[in-house]
Structure formats: C-alpha cells, structure tokens
Amino acid sequence: MDGDGPVVMGRDLHKRHGTGAAAVDALRGVTVELHRGSFTAIMGPSGSGKSTLMHLLAGLDRPTSGEVWLGPTNITGLAEDDLTRLRRTRVGFVFQTFNLLPMLNVEENVVLPLRIAGEQVDRQWLERLLVAIGLESRRAHRPSELSGGEQQRVALARGLIARPTILFADEPTGNLDSRGTEILLYMLRRAVEELRQTIAMVTHDPLAASRADRILFLGDGKIVRETGALQASEVLSVLKETR
Amino acid sequence: MVAFALRGLLARRRRAGLSAIAVTVGVAMVAGTFVFTDTIHAALGRLVRDANGGAEVVVSGRQGLYSATNAATTMPSALVSRVRRLAGVAAAEGQIADTATIVGRNGRVVKTGVLPALAVSYVSKPFTGTPIVRGKPPHGPGEVALDQATATRAGYHLGELVPIVTAQPVRSFRLVGTVDFAGALAGGATVAVFDSSTAAALFNRQQQVNVIYVTGRKGVAPQTLEREIRPLLGAGVTVRSRASAANADLQQLANQLHLLTGGLRVFGFISLFVAAFLIFNALSITVAQRAHELAVLRTLGAVRRQLLGAVMVEALAVGALSSVVGLALGLAVALAIPAVFGAVGVELPSASLVLTVRTVVVSLGLGVLVTGAAGLIPGWRATRLSPVQALRENEAPARRSVPFWRLIAPALVLALVGLALAFASPGSAGLRLDLAAIGAVLVVLAGVLLTPLAVPHLSGLLAWPLERRNPVVARLARENLTRTPARTALTCSSLMVGLALVLFVLVYIGGVRASTTKALNRTFAADYAIGSADGTSSVPAASVRAAAVVPGVGAVSAIKSVTADLGGAGQTTAEGIDPVSLPSVYRFQWVGTPPTLADVGRRDVLVERATARAAHLHIGTHVAVRTGSGLSETATVRGIYVDPALLPGFALPLADFDRLFNQDRLQELLVKVAPFANRAATGELLRKALRPFPGVVVRSERELRQIATARADTIFVLFYALLAISVVMALLGTVNALTLSIHERTRELGTLRALGLSRSQARAMIRQESIITGTLGTLVGIGLGVALAWIMTRALASEGVVFALPWGQFVLALFAGLATGVLAAIPPAARAARLDVLQAIATE
C-alpha cells in the first residue's frame, strides 16, 4: 500500500434484500473510498443503509452489484473461505454488544483472532495494547468481571491485535455510559493518530461522529452528504437537514 | 480452536453433562454385554478344557457332550480296549456322559439356567477331567461326587445324601467328594460324577461309552495318535486333539447362550442409538444457542472448517470422556446382568469379569463414533451461520415453514429403501432378518425426518383440550411449538426413537407369544402335558411307565426331541411322535393335503410350515435328514402342518426317530383322561405318580398357556428397563430443548410478562408446551414402533410370528410420555417464571 491511495474502496454498490414485490433496496449505488489513517464516521437514520454499507466493505456480506476492494484485492468474487482468511489480516471489528467470549479472559479474548488464524502472538504489541486500554493488570479477568466500558476496550484491543488494514466499529458507544463513551472515543482517536490506523465507524451518536475526520451521511441507500470534521452540534443540524 | 472448543465445553458443563450421561449409559450397556459374554465364554472355556484334562486326543461324537437336548453319541466299550492296544497309545479311558438333575435340600431342583445339568463317570489318572479336590472319588452304586460350586450352592456337605434324578426315578446318593470343575463357574452347569459301572446302570449304557480320552507314549505326536485311531471309528464318531475338541464343545455351549447374548447386545445398541439422538439434540441446541458467539468467531476470521472442528472437538471430547466412564460402568452392568436375570428367575453363569481388548476398542470406538456422527449435522449447521448474524440483534426465530421437498425427498427415499430391504426375501432366514432390521432402522430415520410435517397438525389437535380450559396460555404454547416444527420435532426425537424401538420389541415379543397360544389352542387335545419344569431339560423315559399305569388315564403319547437338520436349512428340531396314539391327544393343523397318519412310517417326515418354507419343501419332496452326529438319510415329506409351539421343526415316527437318533429321554408326554374318569382327580394321581421325578411337572392346557405367557412376561420385564432408559434420555433431551427455547424467547417472554402474563401463567405455558411435545413424541413413537414391528413380523411370518398389539404396553408408554412432558417442564418453567421483566425486555 502506497499510503496515499485508498485502502478500502466500494464502487457503485447496490444491495437488494428479498425478491419480487417484497424486495427492499438497502443500497442504491454508493461509491466510497477510505484512505490510510483516516477516521470516517457513517451516519444516517435507521434503514438508510449504513450498516449494510459497512457489512459490504468489511466483506461480511456480498453486494448485489458493484465492487469492493480491500487494499489491492477485489473481494467481490472471492470464495467464502478466502474472504475469511483475508478478513483475518485486513479487517478488525468492534461491535455494539462487545461480543467477547465469556469463557475466555481478557488476554485470551484479545489474542483470539491470531489464535484462530494460527499465527504467533507479538508479545510486545499485545503488551502495548493492554497498557493502552488500561487493563494490563486485569488481563486474567473474565468479561463478566468488567464494566461495559472496559469490555468495549478489550474488544478494541482485539480489533487491533492483527494490525488490520481497517478497523470497523459498529455503534461502538451504543451500549456505553457517557464516561465509557468518552474513554473509548479517546482511544479510537489515539489509534488513528499514533498508529495511522484507518477506522470506519457507524454511529447514531453526534458526539462520536464529531471525533471523525470525515462524515458520510446516508439516506435511502445513497450518500446524501459528505463533510469534513464537524462539531457535535453541527452534526445534529446536518442530520436534521438531510432527514 | 481445540482449546477454544474445550473451554466452551467447560463453560457449559451442565448441558454437556446431559449428553455425557446419555453416551455413558449407551456405552455402559454395550460394554456390559460384551464383558458379560466374554466372561461366560471364558468360564465355559475353562469348563471344557478341564473336562478334557490329561488327554492328548479325544474320541467323541461330532456333536459333543454339552447339548441340553441331544444325548451324546455312544460307542461300544470294546473300542476303548482296541484303542488301548494301538502301538502309540499309553493310556485310554472311556467315559459316560449324560444329564442328571440334582435336587436341593428344599426338595426343589437345583437350577442350571441355560447350561446343562451334566452327569459323567469318573476318570482316573492320567486323565484329570474329574479332579477330586475334597473327599474321595465315588465308588459303587450309592456314591456321587458333585462339583464344588453346586455342592456349595445347594448346601450339601460330604457324607450327606443327595437326591438325584438320572434316567431313573429320583434316588439318593451319598456325597463322598467334590470335583473342581472350572471352579469359578457359579450359577451355571451342575455336574454329578458317578463311577463308571454306576453310570452305565443309571443311564442304560451297559458296554457303552460316550467319550474316550487318550494319551500317547513318549515321543508320539497327537497327530500320529489321531491317524492310528481314526480307522477304528464308526460313523458319527471322530477323533480330535484336546484343543479342537474343547473348541467344538465351547462352540456348542456358546450356541446355547447365543439367543441371550445376542438379545443383550441388541439392548446395548438400542441404548446407544437413542443416546446418539440425545447428543444430536444437545449439540444442535448448543449450536443454536451459540449462533451469536460462532458468528463472532466468523467475523474474527474463523473459516467454516474451524467452526465444524470446534463443534466436532466438543462432541468427540464428550464422547471420549463418557465412553471411558461408560466402559467402567459396563463392568458393573456385566455384574448386574446375572443378578437382574436371577431376580426374574433365570440363572446365569457368573465368574470373575473378563475385559478383552476387543471390548475396550469396540465400546470406546462406538461411543466416540456415535457422538462424532451425531455432531456432524450440528457442526455443519454451525458452518452455515453468516457472520452478519453477529452484528444483528438476537431475535426469536420467526415462523419458518418446513422446507417441504428437502425433508420429504430424502425421507421418502429412506422409507422406500427401508421397505424394499424389509420385504426383499432372500433364501436364508438369517439374512432376511438382518435386512429387515436395517430396513426398519431406515424407516425410523424417515419417520424422524417427516415428523416436523406432522407437528403443526398434531400439536393443534393435542392443544385443543387444553385450549378449552385455558385459552390464552394454551394458544401461546401451541404457537410456540408450531413456529419451528423442526425444533419441536427435534425436541421429542429421543423420546420418539426410544419409544419406537421399545414398542417394536414389545410388539414383536407379543407376536411370538400370541403365535404360541394360538397354536396351543388349535392343536392341544390332551388334558395334561408332562414335561420338565424348566422347559429345557428333558424327561426320563421311565416316567411314561409311571404315568401310563395311573388309573383314569385314557391315552398317553410321548414326544421325543433332538436338534437336527432338514434339507440343509440350518439347525432345527426333530420330533419323534407315535402316529398311532398322537391323534387322540393332538390335532394336527395341516397345510394342503392331510396325510393318513397310520400310513406314515419308515423314512417319512411331517414338516412344520416354517421349516418347510426355509428348506423349500412340498408334499412328496425327498429331503435329507441329518443328525447331530453327522449321519444322513433321505426321507419323503408326507405332510406339512402348523405348530411352532409343541412340534417345531419336523416330526417323524418314533420307530424311525430311535433308529436315527440316540435319544432316550422324552420332551413331552401328552395325557388324555379316559371318558369316564374325573379329570382333576386323575391329574392329582398323575402328580403323585410322578413324584419320583423331581423336575418333571404335570400341566393342564391352561397352565401350559400360562407358561408361554409367563416366559414372554419375563422378557417384558427386562424391556421395561429399556423403556426406563429411553424415557430418562428423552427427559434430558426435552429439558435441554425447552431450556433453549426459553433462552431464545427471553425478550418475548419479558414482553408477555410486562403485558400481564403472571408467573404461574408463564409456567403453565411452558408446561403445556412440554406436555404437548411429550405426547407428540409418544404418539409418533408408538406409530413408528408399530410400523417397525409390522415390518419385522412380516419378515418372520414364516416362523409363525403373528402381528399382535400389546395395548397395555401402549397405555404405559403413553403415560411415560406424558410424565416425561410434565417432568421435563419443571426446570425450564421455573426459569421462565424467574425472568426479571425489565431485564428481559432490554435483552438483545
């Protein structure tokens, strides 16, 4: 990757759910490029297609038409298992519901993607991540012993452990209190600045969106507006306008 | 991934525990029957080896000594002297072998169960077949030695008098010694040892022996001995090395136990089969419950194979662990089998347990294989999960219609192949039975596949009475069941399969019983039948004389019986009948032209329909009658009759029977009371006259029928144990599935509670779901069981097995199913009632 070209690219993406009269067009021609080290927020009302867009860009779902490029690879035609293997190294995830595995402790949860891929754990990198999320002393704790904010930080470390090309965050603050939200957003920002980590974040929360460098507003399966960094209050007014 | 799977397993210990119990029970049953069979075989092996002790080669009839029905082949004593004079022979001794019933202190016969009550003459050094361990060898007409185990069991001490029935009426002999006859064998054969002239007198074997033990001079090989002896031998007599003689004897003994050991093994396999369904059920549920977790793994980069691997590792870990435990428990089962049979009145040999490598390999292998196979489909389903599911909210499954053709097509194929196999009729009865069994299993699987289609209709029907009483709750319960018919079907699958198999066996046994009673009703024209109390040992011929002279007795007709072969169709029974006296006590049920009985004579046979079918015989066919000792003679089929009860196999006139077979004893003595005499009084007199023959009983037709029924009832009792096992397994499966359904509907339940459904209503809803599911499983299970039984009785119709339904057992099964439903609902219903409303609504 040359650092300047897009690391993730979606070209004229269409997604149709169902067939015939019951068919719903979730995406109707979206083209998007995400550049290295960028922090993009994707916003829009329910049903605007923002989650669908993220699923397509992450290779979790396949477009009805259009292409998705992850780095130099066109993933649209890849077989399921090849795509999965690609995802291991190129894509990280943070979910709204944390999705930590309850029977594994903090450290085991963090290194799980590497274990699945059968790769060596870079101990130094692991230590750096654990320190960064402030849980290095609680690495042997189970998820049930952590607060929601702490669990989401573990999920963030898990998303970063494989040094992915891009980290997708799906409503990462949706289940957090204001303090948890504050800490998580700070950490996402640090990842962008210190590691030049590319992040795409789907969110409802104007506060969260205000930490991004760029905001895509979706409506009815299309990008209706694209802005640079905005204050939370500005985000709110754009949301009102585009509704 | 392996570590992940195992960690997951630890986290869900309780659910895994349910599957583990099922596998453990199944493997324990299989291992138990193997250990039991091996133990018996080892004990019998010791018995036959000890009996041939000290001999290098053994001269005996081909059929060996240990048949319960056939008398041993005799040879003239002169043969012993001729063998002794051979150049290579150092020593040779003849022995008489027969059966003798020992009477215990309480006046009752000492039971031998399935093994014969043996009587042998004493052999002296160098032959050690009758090694005296205490006291001295029997000498003279009044002395006997018993095997140590029998003496202990019957409580006889040296010097005491022991009543014994030989070929003569009961007589007391002084116990002068005990022999160590395969000392460990308890509850099996009894052995009485007499000196040779006493044995000859008791069994009418003057100048005759049944077996000759031979040792060679130094440096003479056993093969050389055999070569020297062989030219001296007549037909039906053979000379074998000690080892191969022992092997042949062992084979004969093992064959007598074959029905029992085979039945036990089937029992074990059924448990394992039912266990497989429970594992399948439990793993399916685990996969469904962990759909979210598995989907997360997919997003983290796990490929499908890894998920399949994780589920399989989980299945195999449960399988391996519980197989090991099951193997250990199997030893306990092997110990318990004789005790259980003893409790219902069947004595079985017991000895120190034998655990062979084969048992270990087969039990562990089967346990792991079955769990692995049961894990495949849930594992495959895990791989179908799309990672997007991890990101979606966890919703209760929407109403899903059953993929009609995807279920029906394979089910129809299975059913058709199954039926085709079941109704294919290859020549051999054994193969036909095997094919029918395989076909039956396929039909069950087809039934399992089709069950989801019946779920909506049946649960609607079953919910109807409940809906009248409690409309809202019952309605909810019904909707819950019908929205995922496949899951509902899965929930009751273990109950269904368990019940189907148990009922199948019950219907089958019922059919055998009905065929026996039917035959008795039609053919029995006598007032009394005199036979042995245990049904296996035979009646001394002397009892005919005792019965015939009883005042009031009109006609007496004796039936003798040996095992023989007719037309190469396998071992069957040859019955010796008296064509003159038989018609007054027995009505033949002829198929086709009835013969004139008085004309049936030398080289004529009458054939029972099943045997006729197996050997493809018709009236007028010439057929080879082959005796157990290998003699063969051609006879003509004069008539074909139906009677699987009194005269199974084929019948021939006694004169011819005695010429061909060497059988002094009677199987049955049929007695007709004279027209002027009082029936009951004559019966009493008969009983009195036969008192010198303990072990011989006088039975009226009604008692005869009761015996047939009672024997079937004994088997029924054993199968209730199987019913219990499958109900327990079904219980575990149902609890499992209901718990999952509660878990999946957490939010929905919370909503219902918020809308005003009370705790007790929530409980009632789950209970009703459970009861409907249980009843559903029971009904389908009964249906499948009946279908199976119908298939199998069709395959066995030629053996005289009829299709008869045991209604009492159906009612019992129905109650078992209902009880399963009620019991299985308790934990999940409690869980549903405990739900915190606010939390449940917020749950995603």
Image (cartoon, rainbow, N blue to C red):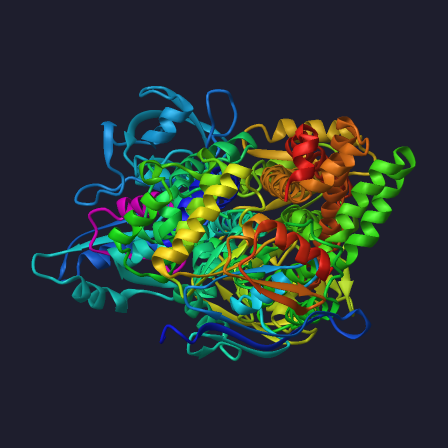
Foreground pick, B490 / B266: B490
Q: Position of residue B112 (x, y in %)?
A: 46, 36
Q: On the picture, is B813 further left or further right than B185?
A: right
Residue B336 in magenta stretch? no
Residue B59 in magenta stretch? yes
Quadrant location, the C terminus of chain A = bottom right
Residue B63 can be seen in this image: yes
* Magenta segment: B34-63
Foreground pick, B750 / B60: B750
Q: Main SS type for the magenta part?
A: helix
Eyeballing the image, is A154 above or below B420?
Answer: above
Q: On the picture, is B581 further left or further right than B46?
A: right
Q: On the picture, is B628 further left or further right than B552?
A: left
Q: Position of residue B649 (x, y in %)?
A: 61, 60
Foreground pick, B451 / A154: A154
What is the total number of numbered labels drawn onto the structure image? 0
Residue B643 can be seen in this image: no
Give the image quarter of residue B382: bottom right
Q: Position of residue B14 (x, y in %)?
A: 50, 37
